[in-house]
């Protein structure tokens, strides 16, 4: 979860399309201001992330409402971020525009938490070329990380496994859980 870039290396639209799942890379939805900040080596704040996460929630809600199953590769580092992906802006703290007045439209989310050491994830991150987030920001993501816990719906997979084993586990999980969870979010930690 510390860097969703590694999850993008694991699965893509071609692999998931064969299963009937649509793939989104959350990084494609960052506004230019967020990208510029990261290029400069400045970690994103909650204030930077919340509008981005709300937009992602809306994308997920649109697709699942039409019956489409979705996988989102996303660095939803905090429980609050995962709550926003599930319930939208109403899950955000009031200072960020959230409110608890009406029942929000929910997305049934299964978090596939790819966990690993700083060294392992850093090694994968260094393989990525041409991305706006420099490897130097990885530590800030580890510092922010709140791994998923019950009652969140999640599974955890170690990135220390072979890439083929990770992909197989993710695909098998998607097949088994697809009726209960039309949206799966891949994250690394």
Image (cartoon, rainbow, N blue to C red):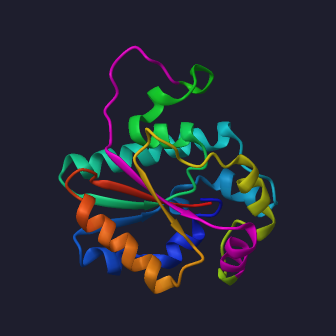
**Residue 106 counted in the magenta span:** yes
Specify whether residue 134 is in view. Answer: no
How many numbered marks, from 0 up? 0
Q: Is residue 166 visible?
A: yes
118 lies left or right of 9: right
Q: Residue at 51% of width from left, 24% of height from top?
A: 98
- Front one among 149 and 124: 149
On the rendered image, what quadrant is the C terminus found in? bottom right
Q: Nearer the viewer, residue 29 or 159?
A: 159
For the record, the magenta segment spans 98-126
Residue 50 location, x and y as percent? 57, 39
Q: In the shown orientation, is residue 182 left or right of residue 44?
A: left
Residue 157 image position (x, y, % from top left): 50, 66
Q: Does the magenta run of residues contain 77?
A: no
In percent of the image, x 40 and y 34: which residue is there?
87
**Which quadrant, please, contains the N terminus?**
bottom right
Give the side of residue 15 with respect to residue 77, left or right: left
The residue shown at (76%, 70%) is: 135
Indicate whether 60 appears above or below 27: above
User: Where residue 73 sits in the image (x, y, percent)?
Assistant: 48, 62
Give the residue displayed 74% in from the left and 67% down from the top: 118
Check the image and name the residue furthest to the top. 101
The picture places residue 153, in percent across and down from the top left corner, at 40, 47
């Amino acid at each position: 979860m510390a860097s969703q870039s590694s999850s993008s290396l694991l699965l893509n639209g071609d692999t998931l399309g064969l299963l009937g799942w649509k793939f989104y890379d959350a990084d494609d939805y960052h506004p230019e201001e967020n990208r510029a900040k990261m290029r400069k080596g400045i970690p994103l704040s909650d204030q930077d992330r919340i509008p981005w996460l709300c937009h992602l929630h809306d994308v997920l809600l649109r697709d699942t409402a039409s019956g489409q199953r979705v996988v989102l590769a996303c660095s939803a580092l905090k429980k609050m971020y995962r709550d926003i992906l599930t319930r939208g802006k109403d899950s955000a703290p009031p200072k960020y525009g959230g409110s608890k007045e009406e029942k929000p439209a929910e997305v049934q989310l299964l978090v596939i938490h790819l966990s690993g050491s700083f060294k392992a994830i850093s090694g994968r991150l260094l393989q990525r070329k041409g991305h706006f987030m420099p490897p130097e920001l990885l530590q800030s993501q580890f510092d922010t990380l709140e791994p998923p816990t019950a009652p969140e719906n999640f599974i955890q997979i170690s990135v220390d496994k072979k890439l083929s084993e990770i992909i197989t586990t993710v695909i098998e999980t998607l097949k088994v859980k697809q009726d209960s969870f039309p949206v799966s979010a891949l994250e690394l930690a």
